[in-house]
Image (cartoon, coloured by chain):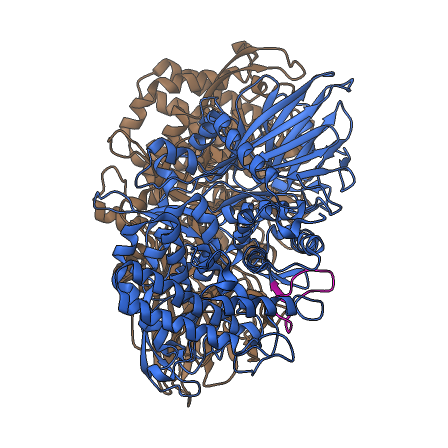
Chain colours: A blue, B brown
Amino acid sequence: MYVGDVSSSYNVQHAPVGAFASFTLGSHHRRGGFASQVGRPGQSNLYIGYREGESDLCCLPYFEATHDPSTVPFGVTLERPKRPRRVFDDRDIRRELGWASDTIRAGRLTLTIFSPFGPIPDPRTAPAAEVALRSCPAVLARLELDNTGGTEPLTGFFALDAASLRDLESTSDGRLIGVAHGRRWGFASRPEPGVRAFQAFSIENAFDGSADRLFRLGKVGGLLVEVPPGARREVWIALGFHDAGVITTGIEARYAYTRHHRGLEEVLSFALDHREALLREAAQRDEELSRAPLSPPQKWLLAQATHGYFGSTQWLDTALEDGAPPAPLWNVNEGEYEMMNTFDLAIDHLFFELRYAPWAVRNVLDLYVDRYSYRDGVKRPGAPGELLPGGVSFTHDMGVSNHFSPPGYSSYERPNLDAACFSYMTYEQLTNWICCAGVYVARTGDEGFLARHRGLLAELLTSLLHRDAPEPDARGGVMALDSSRCGAGAEITTYDSLDHSLGRARSNLYLAGKSWASYVILAHLLERCGDAALAAEASAASRKAARAITSAFHEPSGYIPALLDGSCTSAIIPAIEGLLYPHAMGLLSSDAAEGEHGELLRVLRRHLQAVLKPGLCLFPEGGWKLSSSSDNSWMSKIALCQHIARALLKVEEPDAGRHDEAHVRWQIEGSGYWAFSDQMQRGVPVGSRYYPRGVTAILWLDEPSPAPGAKGR
Amino acid sequence: MYVGDVSSSYNVQHAPVGAFASFTLGSHHRRGGFASQVGRPGQSNLYIGYREGESDLCCLPYFEATHDPSTVPFGVTLERPKRPRRVFDDRDIRRELGWASDTIRAGRLTLTIFSPFGPIPDPRTAPAAEVALRSCPAVLARLELDNTGGTEPLTGFFALDAASLRDLESTSDGRLIGVAHGRRWGFASRPEPGVRAFQAFSIENAFDGSADRLFRLGKVGGLLVEVPPGARREVWIALGFHDAGVITTGIEARYAYTRHHRGLEEVLSFALDHREALLREAAQRDEELSRAPLSPPQKWLLAQATHGYFGSTQWLDTALEDGAPPAPLWNVNEGEYEMMNTFDLAIDHLFFELRYAPWAVRNVLDLYVDRYSYRDGVKRPGAPGELLPGGVSFTHDMGVSNHFSPPGYSSYERPNLDAACFSYMTYEQLTNWICCAGVYVARTGDEGFLARHRGLLAELLTSLLHRDAPEPDARGGVMALDSSRCGAGAEITTYDSLDHSLGRARSNLYLAGKSWASYVILAHLLERCGDAALAAEASAASRKAARAITSAFHEPSGYIPALLDGSCTSAIIPAIEGLLYPHAMGLLSSDAAEGEHGELLRVLRRHLQAVLKPGLCLFPEGGWKLSSSSDNSWMSKIALCQHIARALLKVEEPDAGRHDEAHVRWQIEGSGYWAFSDQMQRGVPVGSRYYPRGVTAILWLDEPSPAPGAKGR
């Protein structure tokens, strides 16, 4: 779909839904392939290509060159057959990334990998067959080989190296032709004439004379496909995963798919049997994105982000022992960090999940209430021993690397850190629950959820107010007190590795926007619950918050300083972030600038227009720079703020096409190996790699058509 | 037990019984630690040591030095606290390896790791409690810290780095203090004052100011132990594994222990609860070996080999679904190669297993009959299309890397290889089944086994005879025809990576000895079954075999050439190997040289005396060289032939102490990192590393006391 002048050398996470598993491929001269339960690409050399007659092997460049032409297993030196490899390079390869497909063309082969996605049924109510189809932990590949112009037989291959390789034919009564790594992943086609599996010490050895191509000690294995001269053929390959049994601790959970697919062979067979339905869905997604009024770079960014999101998802259910039905548990791991349902990511996944799995949003919000909420006191800056009344809030995450942390504690947050990475995010997570819940209720109309948490709403309001000031009269509308959990430290925001312009929580402009949003949303929800007095209190607080923001506008510079108290005067884009949630709930009037929140919107529009320029919040090459005083920028947040700028603030982007192209280059030239990465330092990822958060770009689909920024693209 | 002038830098596989799991430690400046389901050491840096007051960390050298003093997780650079490590070196460390213990002393710490072993109960008949104790997949460590001379508090640590680290306190209701890697392995002590678990980004960070030492994102974790000035204390640590569910394919099996220990926490608790019984057993083994009339190098070799053996064992049972009781399945993996129950290793494990798990011998022999036997034809050299009557034999192995190969096929054997590595070992595996069965029946008196396989005995005899010559008159007593499975190739022996002196099967002197042994044993077993005519036929064949060997004696050289047809005149030690099995069954008269097999014994005694000298079958530094024409030597086979030489042939070893010390140096200076290795090229392992086969040294315990070779040690 997008073939720009950028390289085709970048990894894509070809991921089924909810298996924390990807078949990752595309970065030249790097290893990849299958990996599950881990936040990084697989470690296999992938051998995909063909051989014409007896000539060289032509390979896609998805393996690392070995320096040693010989292998020494079993104390004997085996020369690798001296059969040169011809490796396709960027000039030979044409690649198109769709929303649910990835097509790679080189020489006589075309490889397409399909990772279909769509509505994820609520497992409590959906028919089992629907859950089985949607949760099936496999993607599909089509290998097309064109020998129409050939005069010799052509042999295609799709293979990789891995430990513990085994064949699948003998464990599937001959119904699958392929290889697997233990019981955990594998790939296979259906038996067809001219399609065989092999195992060998090297890809070259697969072409040795022996008729028996299955040398079970071989660490290289895959499929060989014969194509006669003059013919063209395609082979369908299922690429599947299976992680059985309880896979988590703290809360014991297993994959939802294990109730429907008992082993790898079943997964692969199911995927091949349901190929048409799966492909139909992939084609629908591709078509949707293709028709969307987005520029090609935008489409590419959303497609790449979507692949990364699903690679981090876990569709689990708890392993109840008492015969009760399993309870669903949705988790999104934090990419390379592997933290679980990190709340300041969950709020960014919100819009994507509301489109495809609203029940998952509810599931995560409920688990935050049930297990990952806590009550604290608060303290004034410089008063570590002080304990003023605090309130309820939520942890940063639910654990890490498949380990659910104990109730009330994240894996990330640590005491005694002065607004540095790993400190508490108590205030931010409080606003995150409120904003997520508000949008969830607005979009789904889930009155049961609202009723269940009605008592909590009042607590949330109190908690927000207590973090402003203990005395009502002293409250300024924004966060001014740190959680007692910080000990001698101070809270931070999700921008944890930025400087104080976005990192420090107190008086932070970004967080002030989310204070305002939280009060607006609470006012709405309390009203809806009939708690008029509390709703009015929340409403009053929202006006204070808005005033805190607007009154900090600094005319000489033309924008609002990053810390409202003026102690940091950086220019930051996420000043506007909080606007999103009331907007998404429809709480801002259609001509927003004229409504109740008109002044705030006008001031923030001025702010954004002022900061969105080179030297402040644009990198020289056009990328958005979230803070004028830091080279760190987060792509997910850029996408989100771009949407607010276009859809709500109607800010004319100076040179939208150029920005988007810069952002694509960050992902391809900077991140490349790491598929989608979020945290970019001058275009190179320094953290948050292999990351799910980029699906904030889904918001672009909600923009008026054509998007103002699409001009001239 | 053995403190020679060799280095203390060598790995030992601290392994429970039957879990294919080891906690490997001891090679300086290398990583190690926990690993299961894989034939190599773990990949953790181990941090074991102490800190006095606020001074340097004193560490055992069981980690790889990192070049980078800073870590960069989460896009933020964290300086490792600049606290130098003082690393103990060989001069500081005293190490004693016992049969079931390993004690390491350095500075103020003493670390002892106990891996108790003893009789392994037959799971079909033993009480569940016995099976639970014996199969518990854990070893125990004692960390002793001596601060009696100290004036400051001393903090001991026992820690490592690993992915997916988690604490155990929160998942054990506070009954365990320690850390784990997912659900698969971990270590813990019981809660005691002054003992705490930690997780941190580095071992240095564990000493940071914060009171909360459990930073769940940290990839380094372990135990901290406080010792006040003037005090001494010890802490007991269980090191355990848990691989749940079906772990194999082909045959679906799970670990026997999973029926008794449902998770890692249960394993660790059980081991700590049963500490006294486990230690008592370890002490018994240590005491037995200590009192045995072996030289210190012999004791060390047996102890090291025993640790390697258990690290490769798998005590499984098949995962029946139909409610039938699970059927036990014993497997020994082939070290780094991970092949399963490799038959030419099984025969070497035979004597060790008859001592501790005779039911496992039966189990393996039965599975070879039931699933891994096959019937072939045979062919004359140079006649690939020929198909003469063959008979029954057995595969080389049962699969690889937890994958049971299809019935009748090994993972190793390949057609069309001319007596090269990976060819068939049809004849050798035929003799292996016969020799194993003979010794098993003789030692256990298992008449049920004999009766069950009575019909097979006749088939085995026919198969042996058919591989000699089709016409009875043409038979020479030894193997002359290759299996039709070889295609255009020819059979090999277990010495697969040697030259033709030991590698080629036809007319091979080593294999001739096992032909003779097989006929002698079949004659005995058939007689016992009342099949007198067949017994006589076997007996006659044994005499032919003996004559084939003795008549090949070459007076000018003073020994028998490696290939009886004279096409290879190398001198080989394993000429005598076949003698072991009739000897172990008591079939050779007490003054063997005078009995029925007297001539064979006299000739082989002359042979051995002639070849056991420098330039032929001794390396310059004293190690045994199995073939005069190859630098490859197998330690397991040396141990076995040493036993035959001393216990049966009464050959005076030229300089026994020097040989044994050379063999220890092979293991420590050559193998070191790989714990016990078998295949040595001039003292350096080139294959067969991390290997179970060295337990042939158990035969040394059966030698007359004192062993003749023990003189002057």
Q: Is residue B478 above or below residue A430?
A: above
x, y percent for residue B561: 65, 32
Q: Is residue A620 magenta?
A: yes
In the picture, which quadrant includes the N terminus of chain B?
bottom left
Q: Residue at x 21, y 42 (%)?
A: A323
User: The magenta stretch spans which residues?
Assistant: A618-633
Name the chief secondary structure element in magenta.
Answer: loop
- Residue B159 image-quadrant placement: bottom left
Q: Is residue B606 visible?
A: no
x 40%, y 58%: residue? A436
Q: Residue furthest front?
A: A594
Of A13 and A477, nearer the camera is A477
Judge from the rendering whether residue B340 lies leftward or rightward of residue A259; answer left or right: right
Question: How many callouts does the rendering have?
Answer: 0
Q: Is residue A495 above or below residue B601?
A: below
| Residue B56 spot, x, y in % from top left | 52, 81
Whether residue B1 is situated above or below residue A328 in the rendered picture: below
